[in-house]
Image (cartoon, coloured by chain):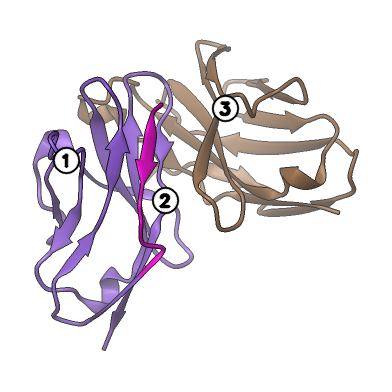
Chain colours: A purple, B brown
Amino acid sequence: AQRVTQPEKLLSVFKGAPVELKCNYSYSGSPELFWYVQYSRQRLQLLLRHISRESIKGFTADLNKGETSFHLKKPFAQEEDSAMYYCALNPGTYKYIFGTGTRLKVLA
Amino acid sequence: EPEVTQTPSHQVTQMGQEVILRCVPISNHLYFYWYRQILGQKVEFLVSFYNNEISEKSEIFDDQFSVERPDGSNFTLKIRSTKLEDSAMYFCASSVSRFVGESTGELFFGEGSRLTVL
């Protein structure tokens, strides 16, 4: 079954501390993975996709096929990073499969 | 910057009533989607729509649900006879392409329509 798991509902870190938001997926093929973010009172928007291998707002995510993971990392959290983060998998069809989301709170 | 717009932002309805949620996708996008999120749960795929027909639907999208693109701009989700468990935030999304390897595969979401069924 195709599934995305985000084990943490809430992650609180202090400003300047490293952040890692966990995402594990279950998919037998070659996955397309994404992180979407929803800031307070804003819409869901794409943060980054694994295929681009890019760093957005200081965030990076590496696809680890052996561990079936796509964790989101940032070395130094900022208060403006506080948001809801969703990991998503596209199995090559018309739909995306989202995880349950992790709320990141960056404390001053 | 063009955006996906959804109306209404919040609708309260009685169980058994019909509800229509409206979306205006970004004008040059070709693929349209509805997702929903029950409070505290994950964002779930309902249906995708391309070339004036449903391209894929989930098991949630049963006979009570329908989608339509009545004109060149609107994309609607109809729930024929609402149930308590239909209470959720409904998100419309659109994309230029479904080929996620391209930059145009990105989903652009609306702000959502909160449906409350009493």
Q: Chain of mark 2?
A: A
For residue A44, the mark is: 2
Q: Mark 2 Cα within 10 Å, few/some/many (few <14, many 20+)? A: many
Q: Position of residue B37 (x, y in %)?
A: 57, 47
Instruction: Give the main secondary structure, helix, strand or loop, of the magenta stretch.
Output: loop
Kindly identify the amino acid type of the residue bearing the numbered disc 1: Glu
Q: Pointers 3 and 2 in contact (CB under 8 A)?
A: no
Q: Residues within 10 Å of mark 3 (few under 14, many from 20)?
A: few
The answer to whether residue B23 is magenta is no
Nearest to the observer: residue B18 or residue A14: A14
Q: Quadrant of the C terminus of chain B?
A: bottom right
Figure quadrant of residue B6: top right
SS type, badge 1: loop
Query: Label 3 is found on which chain of the structure?
Result: B
Q: What number is the disc on residue A67?
A: 1
Q: Are marks 3 and 1 on the same chain?
A: no
The residue shown at (21%, 25%) is B102
Element marked by disc 2: loop
Q: Residue drawn 56% across and 58% down? A: B40
Please give the range of residues in magenta: A1-10
Q: CA distance from mark 3 to mark 2?
A: 21 Å
Residue B47 visible, this angle: yes
Residue A4 in the magenta stretch? The answer is yes
Q: Amino acid at mark 3?
A: Ser
Q: Nearer the viewer, residue A5 or B9?
A: A5
Across and down, in percent, residue B87 comes to 72, 49
Question: Residue B73 shows which numbered tag?
Answer: 3
Question: Does the CB distance between marks 3 and 1 fall below 8 Å?
Answer: no
User: Which of the 4 image quadrants contains residue B9?
Assistant: bottom right
Which x, y percent locates residue B33?
Answer: 51, 29
Q: Is the residue at mark 2 from the same chain as the one at mark 1?
A: yes
Point out the frontmost of discs 2 and 1. 1
